[in-house]
Image: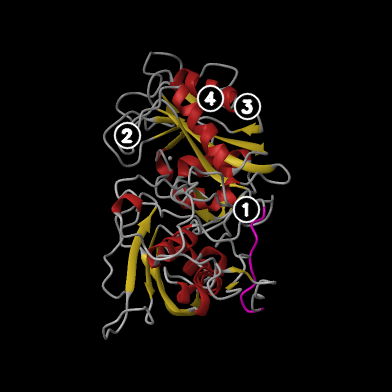
Amino acid sequence: MSDEADVPGRDGHRLDRIRLTGVTATGYHGVFEHERREGQTFVADVVAHLDTRRAAATDDLRHTLNYGVLAEQVVTVLAGEPADLVETVAERIAATVLAHPQVQCVDVAVHKPQAPITVPFGDVVVEVRRDRTWLPAAEPVPDDAPRWLPEGAGAPALPAAEPAPVPPTAPAEPVAPVAPGATAVLPLAAVPVPGDLDLPPAPPGPVPSDPADAWDADEVVEAELVADALDAAPDAPVEVVLAIGSNLGAAQDTLRDAVADLAAVPGLEVLDVSALARTAPVGGPEQPDFLNAVLIARTTLSPRDLLRATSEVERRHGRERLVHWGPRTLDVDIIVYGDVSAVTDDLELPHPRAHERAFVLQPWAQVQPDAVLHGLGGGPVAQLAATAPDRDGVRWLALDWLTAPVPAAQPDPGGAGDDDGVAGDPLGGAPVAWADPLGGAPTGRQDP
C-alpha cells in the first residue's frame, strides 16, 4: 500500500501516517466448507492517517495511535468470527481502526495468499479506504472477542472454549469515563453504541448463482461509528473553561444572556465570570471589535454533550456560520475540559489555538491568576497572555458588566478603538477607564 493518496487534515496539510504491514493470523473466512474447517493464513496491512504533532511535542504515547494495541486488534479480527468475504474482514478492520478518535482516515489491505483459485497466482488482496465521511459498513470488533476454531467438518465455526490471552506487552485498554484531573487516554478503546446496522448473517456455503438469491447491489447499508471516551460522562464534576464572544448587535446584552443560558444548562454550573474585554478582531474580514469574557464552570456532562449544549446556546442567539472567522452574534468555545487531551473530528481539547489568543488568555488570567493551560503550547495562562501575538488588541471594560450596562460595551464599527487609554463610547456616553488585571500594558481573535 505504498501508493495511497495523501489525506488532507482540517488545515489543508497532509495528515501523517502510521503504517502497520504484514500482520498475520490464521482465519476461517471463506464461502467453502473446507475454508471454514481447515482455516488458512490471512495478512493485513493498515495505514492510519492522523496528526502526530501533539504526540511529538509531548513525547507521550497517549497522544498518538498505539500500534502495538492496533496490531492485537487486527489479529482479533483476522482470527475472529468467520466471514464469507474478504471484503467483510477489511470493513471490520477499518471500523476498528476508526474507533480510535484521533484517526481521520484508514487504508486497509487484506491478503488471502492461499485462496482456493484453480490457476497459478501470487496473492489476492482486497483494499478499502474509509474515513469519517465514508464510514465502514461494519462495526468495530471488541478487543475481548474470542478467537474461532472449527468444531467439526462441515459445521459452522464456533467460539473456542476460552479466548486467547492478550500478550503482556500489549494489554487491552478498556474505556474508562473521563475523570477530573486525569488526561484522557489516546488511543481510546471503542464503546459500541446502538445503531441501525442489524443485517442478517451471510448464508453459509458458496455464493448463490441465482441473482434473485443474492444481496441487492443497490441496497443501502448504513453503519454508525462507535462512541469514544468524549461521549462518557465523568464520575465526578469536572472543571471547564468556556470562552464567549460577540461583535454583532447588542453584544453586551447577548453575552449577559448567554451566561444565564449556560448557567441554566442541566449538568453545568457556572462558578465565575471574568471581566468583559473589548478586543480587536484577529484574522477574517474587516469587522467591528469583539466583546469577550471567560467562564469558569463545573460540569457532569460528557465533553461531547457539553459541545452540543454550547452549540444550542449559540443557535438560540442567531449564530450563523457564513464566513470563516467572520462577525457573529455569539461564539461559545470549550477551552479546556479538566485535564482531558483529545483530538477528534468534531472536538479538540484543549482548544488548539487557546495558547496564542490573548482575548481568551487575559480574561482567563483575570479570573484565575494561577491557571495553567495543559497540552501542546500550554503553560501558565498569565505568561501566555503577556506574550500572545494579539495582546495589544485587548481593551478592558468594567468588572461588573453582568449587572450594569457599560457605556463602551458597544464596539465601534472601525474596530480599532482609541489610543488614549480610554475606551470611547461611540454613542457619546462617558468614557470608561481600562482595568489591566495583569499589571502590564493592555494586551485579543475570535473563534480561538
From the top left corner, tell me how far across and down residue 97 is, in percent: 47, 62
Circle 4 residue: 258
Residue at position x 65%, y 75% from top?
164
Q: Nearer the viewer, residue 2 or 187?
A: 2
Which residues are drawn in magenta? 168-176
Residue 307: horizontal and vertical position, in percent?
A: 52, 38
Q: Quadrant of residue 110?
A: bottom left
Q: Quadrant of the N terminus?
A: bottom left
> From where the camera sits, is residue 108 visible?
yes
Q: Which residue is mark 2?
A: 326
Task: Name the front one of labels 2 and 3.
Answer: 3
Res. 339 mark: 1
Q: CA distance from mark 1 to mark 4?
A: 25 Å
Three-letter amino acid code at the position of disc 4: Ala
Looking at this view, is 308 or 142 the one in front? Answer: 142
3D distance between C-alphas at marks 2 and 1: 30 Å
